[in-house]
Amino acid sequence: MKSSSNISAIKLCFFAVGMFGFGYALVPLYDVLCDITGLNGKSENVTQQQQANFEVDESRTITVEFITTLNQGMSWDFEAATTKMQVHPGKPYQASFFVKNRTNHSIVGQAIPSVAPFSAANHFIKTECFCFNNQLLEAGQSLEMPVVFVINPALPDHVKTVTLSYTYFDVSNAANKSLNNIDKT
């Protein structure tokens, strides 16, 4: 009887280790999937030099829409300064977003971008974005945040409108855990 419980315990340990390994392996697979599909706002990485080599297409105008959303329980105000702009592919543009912490305590937020339609995701290039880093807002603090972007002139001709949406999440607990881990080293 004792040996069968030992065997079960060993099987459960192997199962737990296997689940951990599977979860660990999903991270690079997720990154590859996002790179291929443009999901989660992971768009093409282009250096400033490559961007400077884009030829501006003045004959073509693309409508860029900006949508902002807060995850449930996120006590911030979050909005785009403008909800729509007309842009020419190859030319850099800047859009501004505003956030305000409405609580009486500090919150660390992380914006997760998404680009639609699917065919535009790899052509929408953010060179500067508040979504690249977490944002710490103290109680009552507000902040204006820029996004600098360019649309690659290779964007398919059938795409007339590109939507850039952001959802803000409260990552205060994760940020605190990360800081605690740094303090212990």
Image (spheres, rainbow, N blue to C red):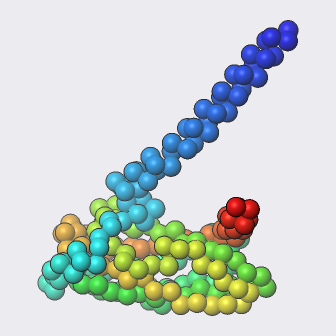
Residue 35 in which image quadrant: bottom left
**Residue placed furthest toward the front:** 185
Q: Residue at x 46, y 62 (%)?
A: 40
- Of the 4 image quadrants, the one containing the N terminus is top right
Q: Is residue 104 above or below residue 179?
A: below
On screen, residue 44 versus residue 61, left or right, reads: right
**Residue placed furthest toward the right:** 1
Q: Nearer the viewer, residue 4 or 113?
A: 4
Q: Is residue 99 above or below residue 176?
A: below
Q: Residue at x 71, y 26 (%)?
A: 12
Residue 160 in sight here:
no
Residue 143, percent from left and from top: 58, 90
Residue 19, percent from left and from top: 62, 35
Q: Residue at x 64, y 87 (%)?
A: 100
Q: Residue at x 57, y 42 (%)?
A: 23
Residue 169, percent from left and from top: 62, 69
